[in-house]
Amino acid sequence: MVGICIRLAAAWGWQYSISDPTCFKFGDSDTYWLIAKNIVDGNPYQYGSSDSRVFRAPLYPLFLVPWTYLVGENAQVSRTAVLAARFAGCVLGGLCIALVIWLARPLANKIGGHPLAISAGLWAGLLVVLYPGAIGMSVFVLSEAIFCPFMLLSLGATFIAIDREENSFRYRQWMLVAGLCSGLACLARPSWSLWPIVLFPYLLLMSGGLSIQSRRFLNVTKLFRLLVACIFFLLGICIAMSPWWIRNYAVVGKFVPTTLQVGASLYDGWHPGATGSSDENMFFVNAFIDAQREEDSQMLQQGKSLDGTLEWRIDRRLRNAAIQWARENSSDALRLGLIKWLKTWSPFPVAKELGSDAVRWMEAIGYSSIMLLGAVGLWKSRCVLGAWLFAMPCVYFALLHMFFIGSVRYRQPAVLVMCVLGGLGCATLMQFLAYKNIGTRKKFDGSITASDVTADSNDN
């Protein structure tokens, strides 16, 4: 409740710091809002013209639909509508706090029992409550607000599945749930769609299906069990995303797994003059649209049929141009990858929208603290089955945004997950300090013995 109240206050302050009541400060927010408004008005699901009908994944615009009903002619009503959407995001932020606590407790319980689990859960929740990046994801009208709860649910279900690995039915059941939640997360943030590529190799190594220490390189039984579980995970994704796939095929005539902005996003990161940030507002797309229209006109004059829709062809054109540039300029692509990594994971954000230096300092301190505490927690739980699962989103998003553009925004979901390990790290440090304090007091009293130290360790 405290976390929700902090977020509500931040949302109020952020909204009334904006002079224009309909201004979101982030361009993506406008696109989500306009698509949601189209749904309310009974217009086609599109952004702008009919040539942008697969522009955004559907989950967040659908979430915004109830709040767009509050929009009217009066500017105050518009401000109320946007503020209501921010408040709804704050409630989702409160859900994320609860989910992080839920994840931290069973992890810590495997190490230190119930007392450590309670402490780790409370510390993990406190980290999320106070972390400026987590507050921002709740306050800004961006898809991370609804993406993060489903991402955490997917990771939690996967962690439970790993714990139930010996029970094939439970293992598959929880992997199906994890896949469903992962699919819903993809419908909020398409960048999550490649998560299985990172998850499945980790499950393979962790489960013992692949072992260089055993006499047999492959454990066939465990490998088969893992294969079935992964199939259930993919089945969950398919169940969640199939309505979107069917709709896209009906619109485009092609299979589109996420959106038709992948090509533009990739070209934004790989093109002549790229800096690693989206500092051109994607104005380069206009030149590609003109070139594609001209090519389409020539093909029609020659009596040739056009493949897919204009939106689909532009996406492919941008994607191919980005890949070709990266192949021809591999050293520049590598240099850009390192620049994007620094932009994403640097303690101090560079986004102008974040405002004052005070906000940047708070973000830097909060982020650095969570990552350091998370490293302690990861070391403490390094032998726990599935513990590394909570550090893997950092690896995943780091690699992903070395290809696309880099920004502090894209690390925030991963840092949120690191709060699970950060809570364990903080509880571990508190436990260590408590033990040290007990030893110091006994030394001061002149009553410490070797048996006392042993007894203290056993009692705790």
Image (tube, rainbow, N blue to C red):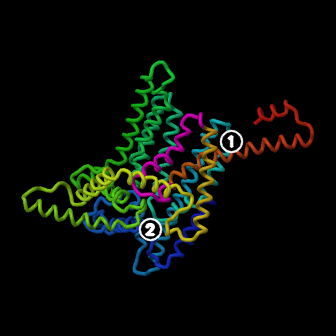
Q: Nearer the viewer, residue 340 or 398?
A: 340
Residue 436, above or below 10: above
Q: Residue furthest right?
A: 446
Marks 1,2: beta carbons within 8 A: no
Can you tell which of label 1 and label 2 is closer to the viewer?
Answer: 2
Determine which residue is flagged by label 1: 116
Q: Quadrant of residue 360?
A: bottom right
Q: Horizontal placement of 16 versus 75: left or right?
A: right
Name the amino acid, label 2.
Phe
Q: Quadrant of residue 262?
A: bottom left
Name the disc covering residue 26, or none: 2
Disc 2 secondary structure class: loop
Residue 423 in view here: yes
Residue 218, above or below 190: above
Q: Quadrant of the C terminus?
A: top right
Residue 373, above or below 77: above
Give the mark, 1 or 2, whose residue is nearer the N terminus.
Answer: 2
| Residues in magenta, as a range | 382-411
Q: Quadrant of the N terminus?
A: bottom right
Residue 187 in view here: no
Disc 1 secondary structure class: helix
Query: How many numbered marks have been drawn onto this rendered protein structure?
Result: 2
Identify the residue at horizontal 42%, vertical 23% (top origin): 220
Q: Nearer the viewer, residue 177 or 343?
A: 343
Q: Residue furthest top?
A: 215
- Indicate the position of residue 117 as horizontal and vertical percent values: 66, 42
Q: Horizontal placement of 449 versus 322: left or right?
A: right
Identify the residue at horizontal 85%, vertical 43% (top origin): 440
Q: Residue furthest bottom?
A: 74
Q: Horizontal placement of 256 versus 335: left or right?
A: left
Q: Nearer the viewer, residue 355 or 430?
A: 355
- Indicate the position of residue 170 as horizontal and vertical percent values: 48, 33
